[in-house]
Amino acid sequence: MTKRELQEIFTEDPVMLATIEGKEFILTGISLGNVARISAITEEVLSLVSDDLPPYEWGCYINEIARIIAIACHNGKTLPHPSDISLLTDFLTASQLLVMLENVYKRMSFDELWKYYQFDNKSSSDEKFKGQGSLWSYVNNYAIHFKGWSEYDIKWKVSFQNIVITSMCTPKYDSEGKLSESSQEPVDLFEFLEKR
């Protein structure tokens, strides 16, 4: 991952995906609320797509793919207008939409960020609780981490990537309330970036 790619994620730089009939489809950061919407549609499509169907034959799922792109570019609490989906399906090919879809998923992915910053997937606590891993637990955890942020802010105003990575950078505590070993190691930012 290049520093430029990291900067684009951090600053949520807009990416122009397409301009159709004067309508611009611009991708910025994708909020938690819209990640939830996109994930639901993705799960729907993936349950219908057989394992042996290559992506270039996903033409029959063009409306779902266009919905995902429209939701990501609209990125608001309200859903995009149906005419936005029609513009995408009427004027773009399946392969063009798949390239746009790839850009959307890059704005929702953590794999490269996880590797780059060497985050582990260990929870700060071994205890399990009801609802852990649900969207509501995300909202609750982020509200605790980011004082003053409302549920609305967490769901709709900040990109999911930035909110998760920011929370990964907060100190971790063990079950006795002591800082975990990894949280105690001081890191010099400039030294860390020079290693990259």
Image: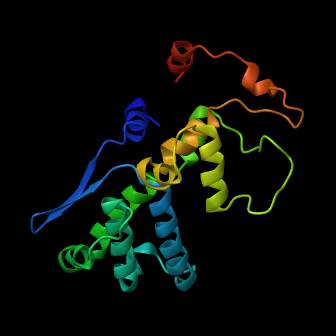
Counting from the top left corner in percent of width and height, residue 14 is at: 28, 46
- The residue at the point 71 percent across, 40 percent down is 120
Q: Position of residue 130 (x, y in %)?
A: 79, 62
In percent of width and height, residue 76 lies at 35, 60
Q: Nearer the viewer, residue 130 or 90?
A: 130
Q: Is residue 48 left or right of residue 59?
A: right
Say which quarter of the image contains residue 87. Answer: bottom left
Please report the residue visible at 68 percent of the width from the left and 15 percent of the height from the top. Answer: 186
Q: Is 57 placed above or below 102 here?
A: below
- Which residue is found at the position 66% from the left and 62% from the top? 134
Q: Is residue 184 above or below residue 120?
A: above
Q: How many marks?
A: 0
Most foreground residue, 175 or 5: 175
Q: Residue furthest right?
A: 176
- Seen from the viewer's position, the closer of residues 144 and 12 is 144
Name above or below for residue 142 compared with residue 52.
above
Compared to residue 176, the image places residue 35 above or below, namely below
> In the rendered view, how is the structure colored?
rainbow
Residue 9, quarter of the rendered image = top left
> Where is residue 36 shown, x and y percent of the image?
52, 65
Does residue 7 appear left or right of residue 130 in this picture? left
Residue 144 falls left or right of residue 61 = right
Q: Residue at x 43, y 73 (%)?
A: 55
The residue at the far left in this view is: 22
